[in-house]
Image (spheres, rainbow, N blue to C red):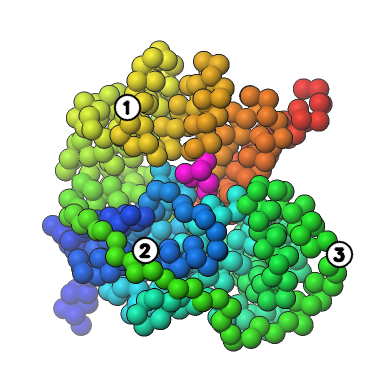
Amino acid sequence: MVLGTSCVRRPLATCPEKGGADWREVNSPHFRISTDLGSRVARFTAVELEQLRAALLLAWGSEVDPPGQVEVIVARSEMELEEFTQGAVLEAFTDSSSRSPLMVMAGEGLFLREEPEGLQVQAHELAHHILRFEMVRQPRWLSEGLATWAQTVRFSSLRRKATFGGIHWNSLRYVLSHKPLTLEKLWAWDEQPLTSVAETVPYYASSWLWVVYLMDQHPERFRDFMDRLGRAEEPRRAWEEAFEGVTGLNEAVQRYQPQQKEQLTVELPRITPKLKVRELDCAEIHALRARLFLRSPGRRSLETRLSLASREVEEALREDPTNVNAVLLQASLTVEPEQRLTLAQALVRARPESGPAWSLLGQALQETNAPAAAQEQALQRALKLDPEDVDALVAMAWLHTERGETAEGLAKAERAVELAPGRASTLEAYAALLFQSGRCEESVIAQQRAIGIVGAHVTEALREAAEATQLAMRRKLAEYMGHCRGEPK
């Protein structure tokens, strides 16, 4: 028994020389996948994510085509992710707060077509990403209801058709055994304190039922509602306009029985994306582990997360002192602006062709009040190397505004929001720039969007910080609204 127990080891998402498997990165047009699954499985996963993305875009029936890449981390198993999530009940998670949107999931040694439940997870999280571009304003009940509707997707055997709108059985079982929440309670979801997973179950299930009901019984009005949200109308006002004169919806939803019928089938083009595969070295793997410690759900305190992430960054820098991802993380964990500037200067000397390195330098120069010419030079170099660097765009927007170049600043900020509509800090910066330029009503809308994002998804360890952030953002919103109404300061 002792021998048997000692031979059982938890698999680790780490370097091969430290007991892990080989890691590789697969780049496709819209995804950058890091995984310790085999090379063949990694390639299949990239192709199937591209197919799923195409199916979701066709399902929305619009011209939206989200720019950039989604970063995806696929661990071999849930046991590997356990090191980072510490038993948090989840199938996958997303995070839009950093340089690029992130999706994390466990592969369990399979690619998507062999595991329909895994496909549901991918579809739900990817739907959230796409919907941020489709509807710039969205109440949480609508966002979660649509994502749950999307995760019932099924592909034909040859992957030429995708069908949506089947029954989401967990949600159906819940609403059959409990009364679904009224629409008024679902609207209040956005205003409530951030809640635990268990507390949100009635909201997720009821949101799915409302979306299915509205698609089935009021398709034209529902589409009008979503179109209005896409034009940035205030959600409640958009609802009242789209459903003017309609009464008795709460009672109708209580009586509604979803039918096991597909609501939508889309024809897929043949999707054969070009893939680039490269092996990840140990420095990159440690940097990846640091991001997982920082951004995973779970019970760990913020202090513990920072400590674990710092240790991984130190390991990465021991392996390669100029690894870009590791230095970027080191800078984010460094409090003093002057120290961040020193790190950035060293990084651009070592990696002069790295856009993120120049972006870090531009931001560090800005934080230390360096001459505007030096800031501009670094940021322009960053944007030449990577025109879609959201951080560099926001920093350049501030630089333009400080020099009185309001139009140029807003153009950069607007582009940043187009690239990262799910990132609260980008929207908050955009709101501030709009306010400074005298576009008061638009600044209110942008700030409201930012507040909604902060409240949507947050790990337990960051709940207190998120609530404090929301409170500060609401105070700023009140300032904007008071100015719009002409109230004295």
Residue nearest the observer in this picture, 156 or 290: 156
Question: Where in the figure is residue 386, as x and y percent of width and height?
Answer: 34, 37
Tag 1: amino acid: Arg
Q: Pointer 1: what residue?
A: 381
Q: Pointer 3: what residue?
A: 245
The N terminus, quarter of image:
bottom left
- Under tag 1, what secondary structure? helix
Question: Where in the figure is residue 358, as x and y percent of width and height?
Answer: 31, 29
Tag 2: amino acid: Glu
Question: In the image, what residue occupies the spot 67% across and 41% down?
Answer: 445
Q: Pointer 2: what residue?
A: 50
Question: In the image, what residue occupies the spot 45% across and 73% down?
Answer: 267
Question: In the image, what residue occupies the spot 47% across and 44% down?
Answer: 419
- Under tag 2, what secondary structure? helix
Q: Is residue 444 left or right of residue 10?
A: right
Question: Where in the figure is residue 103, as x and y percent of width and height?
Answer: 41, 58
Query: Is residue 422 rendered magenta in the image?
Result: yes
Sequence-wise, the earlier of marks 3 and 1 is 3
Q: Is residue 436 left or right of residue 67?
A: right
Sequence-wise, the earlier of marks 2 and 1 is 2
Is residue 294 visible in the rendered image? The answer is no
Where are the magenta residues, as a range?
A: 417-423
Is the Cβ of the residue at disc 3 closer than 8 Å to that at disc 2? no
Is residue 419 visible in the rendered image? The answer is yes
Between the residue at mark 2 and the residue at mark 1, the CA separation in whole angstroms equals 31 Å
Question: Where in the figure is residue 318, as x and y percent of width and height?
Answer: 18, 40
The C terminus, quarter of image:
top right
Query: Is residue 31 rendered magenta in the image?
Result: no
- Under tag 3, what secondary structure? loop
Q: Is residue 184 left or right of residue 177?
A: right
Tag 3: amino acid: Gly
